[in-house]
Image (spheres, rainbow, N blue to C red):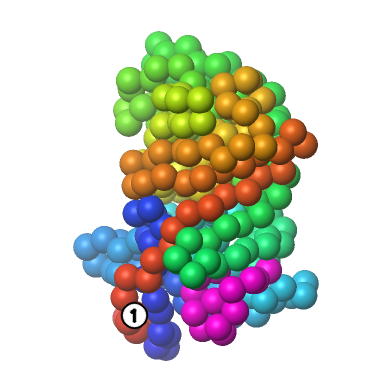
Amino acid sequence: MTLAFVKYEGLGNDFVVLSAAPDALGAEAARRLCDRHLGVGADGVLVVAPPTAGGDARMIVLNADGSRPEMCGNGLRCVAAFVAAERGARALVIETDAGPTRCVVGADGAVEIEMGRAIAEGAVELEIAGERLTLARVSMGNPHAITFEPFPAFHALGLAVATHAAFPDGTNFEVARVVGPREIEVVVWERGVGPTLACGTGACAVAVEACRSGRAPFDAAITVRLPGGALQITVSPSLDVSMRGPARRVFRGELDLGR
């Protein structure tokens, strides 16, 4: 079985994007495609399927380990850019496992997305390998655990946090640092992926918690800097979130799923 695909990236968060039926790929196929030595190489696979609820397309995300997260902000920008290029439309509704999202693809290639309403789920305290952490939990349709405290052992302990029993379905883990009135630096351990150059929903979750805790203002564009680049996030007092950032096509190719 051969399928055409497009490689996209958003701030270095890279994806294999393809138009297919929702069940065209299983976990093993996703793992093989994402392998950076034996496959195409990616943080995840984005299946663009026919809509089921009146949108323009449906996005299904498969992580590099084959798991299926509810939402992916950088992936959503890539899917919006992909659908816009295929259809010549700039205003789109993309259906996700976390609900429909409105996207606008700008002439400059940046994509603005209405990410929906965040849910603040309270704090949790963990002790891992001698480190005591207080993490703010925020849902962007997928789970996030956030700290603004220095955490030098991020790469050593990120997996332990992301898979801790306190999070039955796992969690994305963000370490954030406020560097200006409207500027935050963030590193992310992405559930099912590991350390990643960028995470759109993670940037949104951090901005939400920054606004809730008085570290950043509501109703203002906040620059969230990730290792792969910056996103602009705006949070309303009701915790409705919008995100603006780039999505770029890297190359096209074909997949032989029978090999």
Where, by quadrant of the figure, is residue 150 drawn? top left
Give the side of residue 197 with respect to residue 59, left or right.
left
**Total marks drawn?**
1
Nearest the camera: 183 or 28? 183
Question: The C terminus appears in which quarter of the rendering?
Answer: bottom left
Give the x, y percent position of residue 31.
Answer: 39, 62
Nearest the camera: 236 or 160? 236
Element type where label 1 sits in the image = strand
Give the x, y percent position of residue 173.
Answer: 49, 34
Give the x, y percent position of residue 205.
Answer: 58, 37
Where, by quadrant of the figure, is residue 37 drawn? bottom left
Give the x, y percent position of residue 91.
Answer: 64, 71
Q: Residues within 10 Å of mark 1 (few under 14, many from 20)?
A: few
Give the residue at x 29% y 69%. 39
Q: Which residues are magenta?
A: 80-93
Give the residue at x 62% y 20%. 214
Q: Is 84 a magenta residue? A: yes
| As drawn, 88 above or below 12 | below
Give the side of residue 135 with respect to residue 43, left or right.
right
Q: Amino acid at mark 1?
A: Arg
Query: Is residue 55 in view from this perspective?
Result: yes
Give the residue at x 51% y 31%. 182
Q: Is 243 a magenta residue? A: no
Nearest the camera: 251 or 42? 251
Q: Which residue is mark 1?
A: 252
Give the side of residue 64 with respect to residue 166, left or right.
left
Query: Is residue 205 in view from this perspective?
Result: no
Give the residue at x 68% y 69%. 93
